Image (tube, grey):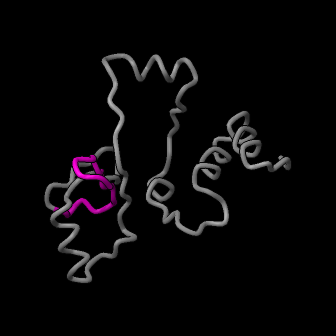
């Protein structure tokens, strides 16, 4: 991560000071408490997901991009969003798309050269 780059932290721990619920059971923030909890062996680094960078949209721009097929909006479970994704036999993006089924599953299989339905 370069200096000045935005890093977001998501997790499932509402007890962290500064954590804000973004959807039921999933929280953003609480970095200082997260560092302390990992340092004190109360939590592990795998309890957190880090995202470097960010996207910024003008009002209405994201809705337009979704309508134009540039993004896919999907409901998801807490367990899938917070799933440890390092070393999985199937990439997490592919798993999520296959769970959506239909054209989304077919797209994911096509990207990875998997022809079985």
Residue at image location 62% in from the left, 57% down from the top: 91
**82 to the left or right of 98:** left
**Which residue sits furthest right?**
116
Quick one: 87 or 27, which is closer to the camera?
Answer: 87
In which quadrant of the rendered image does the N terminus lie? bottom left
Residue 59: in magenta span: no
Quick one: 80 or 54, which is closer to the camera?
Answer: 54
**7 to the left or right of 36:** right
In percent of width and height, residue 92 lies at 58, 55
Residue 14: in magenta span: yes
In percent of width and height, residue 108 lies at 69, 43
The answer to whether residue 61 is above or below residue 29 is above
Q: Main secondary structure of the magenta part?
A: loop
Asked where in the image residue 72 lies, by quadrant, the reply is: top right
Residue at image location 31% in from the left, 17% down from the top: 59
Asked where in the image residue 89 lies, by quadrant, the reply is: bottom right
Residue at image location 36% in from the left, 57% down from the top: 50
Q: Which residues are magenta?
A: 1-16
Quick one: 52 or 87, which is closer to the camera?
Answer: 52
**Which residue sits furthest bottom?**
41
**67 to the left or right of 40:** right
The answer to whether residue 70 is above or below residue 31 is above
**107 to the left or right of 8:** right
In percent of width and height, residue 43 lies at 30, 76
In percent of width and height, residue 45 lies at 35, 72
């Amino acid at each position: 991560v370069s200096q000045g780059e935005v890093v977001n932290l998501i997790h499932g721990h509402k007890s962290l000071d500064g954590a804000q619920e973004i959807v039921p059971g999933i929280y953003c923030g609480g970095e200082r408490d997260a560092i302390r909890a990992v340092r004190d062996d109360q939590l592990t680094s795998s309890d957190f997901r880090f995202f470097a960078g960010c996207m910024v949209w003008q009002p209405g721009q994201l809705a337009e991009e979704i309508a134009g097929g540039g993004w896919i909006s999907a409901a998801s479970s807490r367990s899938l969003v917070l799933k440890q994704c390092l070393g999985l036999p199937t990439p997490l993006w592919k798993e999520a798309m296959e769970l959506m089924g239909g054209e989304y599953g077919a797209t994911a299989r096509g990207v990875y050269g998997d022809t079985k339905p």
